[in-house]
Amino acid sequence: QRQPNGAYMKIDYVANAASMGAKTLTADSPETLRLALKEARAIQQPVVIVVAAEKRGSSIGAGHWWDLGVAEVSGTEGNERAFRRFDEGKKKQRTFA
């Protein structure tokens, strides 16, 4: 199985999100994430919460991938149509890494 083997790029996600007009918050523990989520809910603009992830942690090669999709159940027909399209699209996904 192929594994990523290149150098990591240093990306400033806080600066990137702020450059697009988002309010940025950071979290480095479950408690600071809870606080950031609480704060984000009170902000009336786009918010990005930046959480550092472990480099090449256990998810690579573990057979899973974080795929943010659409809520499966929402009670709105538009969202349920979006979920069906998302679900059909997942069947066409290919794994490259």
Image: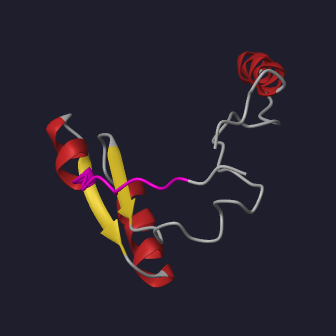
Residue 49 lies left or right of residue 62; in this view the side is left
Instruction: Provide residue 66's location: percent of width, then percent of height.
Output: 64, 50
Residue at screen point 63% across, 42% down: 68
Q: Is the magenta stretch mostly helix, strand or loop?
A: loop
Considering only vertical position in the picture, is 76 above or below 40? above
Residue 14 lies left or right of residue 91; in this view the side is left
The answer to if 6 sits in the magenta stretch is yes
Q: In which quarter of the image is residue 44?
A: top left
Instruction: Provide residue 92's location: percent of width, then percent of height.
Output: 79, 20
Q: Quadrant of residue 3?
A: bottom right
Considering only vertical position in the picture, is 18 above or below 52? above
Residue at screen point 65% across, 36% down: 96
Residue 34 lies left or right of residue 64; in this view the side is left
Residue at screen point 20% across, 34% down: 20
Viewer-closest of 85 and 39? 85
The magenta segment: 4-13
Viewer-closest of 34 and 41? 34
Residue at screen point 24% across, 56% down: 10
Viewer-closest of 71 and 96? 96
Viewer-closest of 38 and 94? 94
| Colour approach in the figure | secondary structure
Considering only vertical position in the picture, is 76 above or below 22? above
**Which image quarter is the C terminus in?**
top right
Instruction: Provide residue 21's location: percent of width, then percent of height.
Output: 19, 37
